[in-house]
Amino acid sequence: MNHLIIGAGPAGVVAAEALRKLRPSDPITLLGDEPESPYSRMALPYFLIKQIKEEGTHLRKQPDHFSKQNIKVVRDSVASIDRAAKQAKLKSGGSASYDKLLLATGSHPIAPPIPGMDLPGIFNCWTLADSRSIASRAKPGAKVLLMGAGFIGCIILEALAQSGADLTVVEMADRMVPRMMNDTAGNLIKAWCEKQGVTVHTSTRVTAIRKGTAHALAAELSTGKVVDADMIVSATGVRSNIDFLNGSGIQTDQGILVNRQMQTNDPDIFAAGDVAQGRDFSTGEYSVQAIQPTAAEHGQLAARNMAGLQGAIHRGSVNMNVLDTLGLISSSFGLWMGKPGGDSAELLNRDRFKYMNLQFEDDILVGATSLGMTQHIGVVRGLIQTKTRLGKWKQKLIEDPTRLMEAYLMSTQAVGFNAGILK
């Protein structure tokens, strides 16, 4: 069985390694479109602040890692998929054949439709090449404008601030990290960043960029303010890489549509990672979840099904984000925004930047948000993922959300006792 994996990010690498264990003698080709060894985008900010070298971003540190596993690595881009011939047509002019194909092509940054976005000095922080350019310019005192304060934007924010640059952040939403944090938490993160010397504009858009006078660039804001910058970094969103599938018959929406085996409408073609519209654990719906843990989970499941194993069913990925913003740890899980008709609990110490919000459906924890409190992260995920019934502990958590560990231990022991596990 000939396995072709398109995409050398976390989903593709994990899938290739899992396939090698399951199918020791099958040909496996891992195709990536960048000149570097497979690397993690999540590690790029650490490269920016020189905490790690380029090699530290690599998903596998040994240069001969893939050759030792007899995984062929090819550096090329895919132009199209010919399902009838079972071939991927390459932009170099060649082709790669397959019996089983995994599409793990990831996503790409979206450039907002702003006049001047094509000027020199404007970058995404998406590739190692981007990071090299940003690192060479993010120096102490340099004026840097960051467009976007979502999850990826805030990771970049951390690196840019630590570089010593004079940093200004512009976010369209009314709070920072709007797809991860509610109004209270998102604005606490804003206040924290401002306390660390970062200028943050929320409910604000960049309307145009032009060449500057005192500095290389000048950004016009929707508020009428003009921000001078030596460099602008755009982190305004991403989109799944699916254009190469036009005309292939593979069904797509926001990403590639897959079933619970990570299988597309073609039984020999699978998808994983940022490009896959996979199952959400909390809602049961299918959506693109562009986070590295989900990509790795998808890769494992796809590999098991490509190898023909039975029972490799995707139960759904728990929406989980943990973010370090200049030393302030924030996290969100599951249905952090709550469910209609559900109950909630909230704890806030604004002066100490500590916050916790719990969301319930009946007596089951379905979502949570925390800020400045890390001791409950594992327990929260466990309660959500196991759908543990809290019983009387729900009310105790509403009264004091910090008693999560007690609630977990007592509720799981009660379940064990009732099942006859504990005597």
Image (cartoon, rainbow, N blue to C red):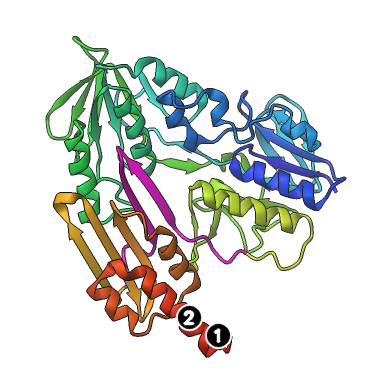
Give yes or no for residue 318 being in the magenta stretch.
yes
Circle nearer the N terminus (2, 1)? 2
Q: Residues within 10 Å of mark 2 (few under 14, many from 20)?
A: some
User: The C terminus lies in which quarter of the figure?
Assistant: bottom right
Element type where label 1 sits in the image = loop
Foreground: 18 or 340? 18
**Which stretch appears magenta?**
314-339
Query: Up-down: is 107 above or below 267?
Result: above
Instruction: Identify residue for label 2.
Output: 413
Q: Residue at x 43, y 56 (%)?
A: 320
Residue, x 48% and y 52% (percent of image)?
289
Q: Is residue 258 left or right of residue 350?
A: right
Circle number at residue 422: 1
- In the picture, residue 214 is in which quadrant? top left
Q: CA distance from mark 2 to mark 1?
A: 8 Å
Q: Which quadrant of the view contains residue 367?
A: bottom left
State the residue in front, 109 or 54.
Answer: 54
Examine the structure image and report whether residue 29 is included in the region drawn in magenta. no
**What residue is shown at x 72% (from left), y 44% (from top)?**
16
Pointer 1 local density, CA inside 10 Å: few below 14, some 14–19, many at least 20: few
Q: Amino acid at mark 1?
A: Leu
**Disc 2 residue type (three-letter):** Gln
Query: Is the Cβ of the residue at disc 2 closer than 8 Å to that at disc 1?
Result: yes
404 sits left or right of 176 in the view = right
* Residue 174 picture location, percent across and down: 20, 48
Q: Residue furthest left?
A: 224
Q: Tell me, for residue 288, which label it has, or none.
A: none
